[in-house]
Image (tube, rainbow, N blue to C red):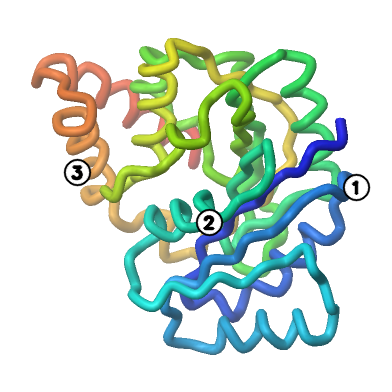
């Protein structure tokens, strides 16, 4: 497969991480990609780091897109989506890392499964980007009903084929946990499955401060998705939320 992959990265105040993230894309064994860095009105030196890299590397595959107003990750990803030229859409967060074979293996898997929506396993990493040994394994498939109870699909592992799922349907809603809302909407509206490649191809950075922080906020966000984005009743929301909470804890312990 030689089709273009558009990699969309929302970037906000990521000066410590963004260069290494760019380099992990440059190191991919699959070479037909474009990297769309959407700078969401950064207030640190992120944009300077990117422009310095572009000046030194001369890369025509890396594009810096400037958002004049800070609008959040969903709006940044949607801006990148609107300018993407590839058949395949992949997401990568500004502080996460891919192993060199990530694109190659994901594309091969997507072709083997004749799928429109795939995701992979990943490993938690510390602030330096080193893997902690805690690997999240993924199931072979996830349906809409299963996704409501499951935290497995992680943004930096996802890829879509726009010949099977129209690009216009990949716009993220501008709500909290916008990525999860998109996975659910695609699975529900397309009546499809998401296919999981159970290989550790991504490093998910998290700081020590995030290991136990914002649990109440996380529950509030997922509850809002059940009730408002999906229109589920209270009992159904509670039932799904119970499974979601148990799996979220197991994934992180």
Give the farthest residue toward the right.
29
Identify the secondary structure beneath mark 2. helix
Point out the tag, 1 or 3, that comes first from the N-terminus.
Answer: 1
Q: Where is residue 218 in the image (x, y as percent from the top left)?
A: 28, 46
* Quadrant containing the N terminus in the rendered view: top right
Q: Mark 2 points at which residue?
A: 80
Q: Mark 1 points at which residue?
A: 29
Crowd rating for badge 1 (residues with CA inside 10 Å; few <14, some 14–19, many 20+) = some
* Residue sitting nearer the eye, 236 or 41: 41
Q: Position of residue 112 (x, y in %)?
A: 79, 15
Q: In this view, does 146 lie above or below 51?
A: above
Q: Determine which of the numbered discs, if any, sits on residue 220 in the image.
A: 3
Crowd rating for badge 3 (residues with CA inside 10 Å; few <14, some 14–19, many 20+) = few
Which residue lies at the image location 60% right of the left edge and 32% below the top edge? 160
Give the farthest residue toward the left.
234
Q: Does residue 230 appear in this view? A: yes
Identify the secondary structure beneath mark 1. loop
* Residue sitting nearer the eye, 15 or 52: 52
Say which of marks 1 and 2 sits in front.
Answer: 2
Taking the image as shown, residue 59 lies to the left or right of residue 146, namely right
Which residue lies at the image location 23% right of the left edge and 51% below the top edge? 217
Q: Determine which of the numbered discs, if any, sits on residue 59 in the image.
A: none
Give me the C-alpha separation between circle 3 and circle 2: 28 Å
Which residue lies at the image location 78% right of the left edge and 86% below the top edge? 55
Identify the secondary structure beneath mark 3. helix
Crowd rating for badge 2 (residues with CA inside 10 Å; few <14, some 14–19, many 20+) = many
């Amino acid at each position: 497969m030689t089709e273009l992959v558009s990699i969309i990265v929302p970037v906000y105040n990521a000066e410590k991480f963004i260069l290494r993230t760019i380099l992990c894309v440059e190191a991919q064994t699959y070479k037909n990609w474009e990297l769309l860095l959407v700078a969401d009105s950064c207030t640190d030196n992120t944009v300077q780091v990117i422009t310095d890299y572009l000046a030194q590397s001369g890369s025509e595959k890396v594009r810096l897109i400037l958002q004049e107003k800070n609008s959040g990750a969903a709006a940044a990803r949607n801006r990148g989506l609107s300018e993407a030229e590839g058949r395949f859409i992949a997401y990568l967060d500004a502080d996460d890392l891919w192993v060199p074979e990530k694109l190659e293996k994901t594309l091969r898997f997507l072709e083997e499964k004749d799928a429109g929506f795939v995701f992979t396993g990943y490993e938690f990493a510390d602030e330096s980007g080193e893997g902690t040994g805690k690997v999240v394994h993924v199931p072979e498939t996830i349906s809409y009903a299963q996704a409501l109870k499951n935290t497995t699909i992680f943004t930096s592992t996802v890829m879509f084929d726009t010949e099977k799922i129209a690009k216009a349907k990949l716009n993220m809603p501008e709500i909290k946990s916008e990525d999860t809302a998109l996975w659910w909407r695609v699975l529900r509206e397309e009546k499809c499955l998401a296919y999981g490649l159970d290989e550790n191809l991504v490093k998910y950075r998290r700081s020590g401060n995030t290991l136990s922080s914002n649990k109440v906020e996380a529950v509030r966000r997922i509850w809002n998705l059940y009730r408002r984005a999906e229109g589920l009743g209270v009992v159904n929301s509670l039932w799904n939320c119970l499974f979601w909470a148990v799996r979220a804890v197991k994934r992180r312990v």
